[in-house]
Amino acid sequence: MTDRSPKQGPIRRTVYGGNITRNQVEHVYGNAFPVLNQFVTELKSLLGKLCVDRKIKVQAIEGRAKDVNSLVDKFKRHPEYELLSDCEDLCGVRIITFYLSDIPLVRNLIRDQFEVLKEEDRRAPLPEAFGYQSLHLVGRLNKQRRSLPEYRDFADFVIEFQVRTVLQHAWGVISHALDYKTEDEVPAEVRRKLFRVAALLETGDELFGTFRTEIEGLRNRYKDQATGQEWRELPLNLDSTLASWTRMPLAEVKRVAVKAGFGPYDFRDTSSLDLRRSLSKLVSLATVAGYRTMGELANEMSNVESERTRLTAVRRECVKRGFTPRGDPVDIMVLFMLLQDPDLRARMAASFRSQLEEALDIVLNGGHGQEPEARSTP
C-alpha cells in the first residue's frame, strides 16, 4: 500500500461543504448526489480523452456515484466511519484495459493528471489472496484542474479509481455475482475449482500480452519487408496486405475500373479502419481461392484487364437496378475473383449487396445486356 495522504489517519477532505457526521450523511449526501453524478459523467469523458491522447486503447471506462441507500448501508457496516469523507468510494471509475502491460500506463496517466492520495495494488501474488483483482487508487482532481471553472463545483470530490484488464473484470463480475468476498466464504468442495479459474484467467492475461508483443513484432517486420523487393514473398494475410498495399498494382486496377465505367473513388489511407475491414474480405477470398503470397495476389491484380468486359457488364447491371458501384480497387479485385471462380461465393458463404448479387448472377450466366442511359449514384 502506498499512502500519499497526510499521516493523521483517514483522508480528511472538505467534501460537500464540510465535515458531515454519520447522522447527517443520508440528508446531506442525498442533496449532493446529483452533482456527484454529473461529476462522474465529466470524469469518464475526461479519462477517455486522456487515454486517447496517450494512445492507450481501453475496452471501457465505467463510472458511478454511490447510491444513497448503498452509502447508508455502508455506514451501518462500518461503525469506524465518523464522517462522510471517511468513505473513499462515493465517486468510482473503472478503467478496463485489454492487456496487463497497459495497466502501468493508465496508472501513470492518473498520477500525472490527478492528485493521488492513496494507491493499492491488489494484484500482488500473496498465497492468501482470494481471486484475481486489480489496481486501486484514491485521489481527486489536481490543483490546476480544480481551478478551472468547469471543474470548480467538483474540486473537493474524492475519486476511487480501479484499473483492471478485461479478464480481471470478468473475475470481478462473476465473483460478485456468486457473492463471495473472501476465501473462507467459498464451500471447500468447490474452492479448488474457483482457484483454478482464477489461475486460468491470470495465465490468459499473460498469454494475451505475449500474443500482442508477437503480433506487433510481426507487423513491424512486415512493414520493413514491404519497403524492399522481398515484399512479394510475404505470406498472404491481413497484416502483410496492409503493410504492402501501396506496393500493389493499384494504378492498373484503377485504370480498368475507370474504363469499365465504375464510379469515382479516392484511394484510402492504409491506416483507416475502413480499409482494414475491406481488405479483410479480399484476403479471406484470396486465401480460399488458393493464393499464398503477396506476389501471387499482385500478379492477379495485374491481370484484371482480362475481365474488363465482364466487369463492365456487372457495373451495367448494377446501374439498371439503381446502384452505381465505385471503382474501389479492393471491390474491383473481389469482383474479379468472383468472375474468375464463381464457386468462391458459395465457398466463402459471403453475401453482397442485393443489386450486386443479381448483376453477378446475370453476367455469370452469360447475360450482358445493353448500356442504359447514364444515371447518378443514389
Image (cartoon, rainbow, N blue to C red):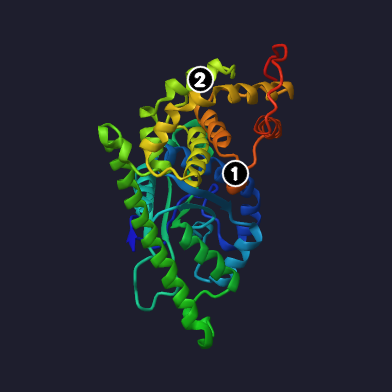
- Look at 67% across and 18% down and name the residue there: 377
From the viewer's side, name the closer residue of 44 and 284. Answer: 284
Label 1 sits on a secondary structure element that is loop
- Neighbours of disc 2 within 10 Å: few (<14), some (14-19), many (20+): many
From the viewer's side, name the closer residue of 289 and 376. Answer: 289
- How far is disc 1 from disc 2 in space, using C-alphas? 24 Å
Q: Which residue is mark 2?
A: 256
Q: Quadrant of residue 145?
A: top left
Mark yes or no: residue 54 visible: no
Q: Residue at the far top: name it.
A: 373
Q: Position of residue 226 (x, y in %)?
A: 30, 34
Q: Position of residue 330 (x, y in %)?
A: 51, 31
The label shown at residue 51 is: none
Work out whether 321 lies above or below 31. above
Q: Quadrant of residue 51?
A: top left
Which quadrant holds the N terminus?
A: bottom left
Mark yes or no: residue 65 visible: yes
- Look at 30% across and 47% down and name the residue there: 217
Q: Which residue is mark 1?
A: 343
Label 2 sits on a secondary structure element that is helix
Which quadrant holds the C terminus?
A: top right
Name the front one of labels 1 and 2: 1
Q: Earlier in the sequence, mark 1 or mark 2?
A: 2
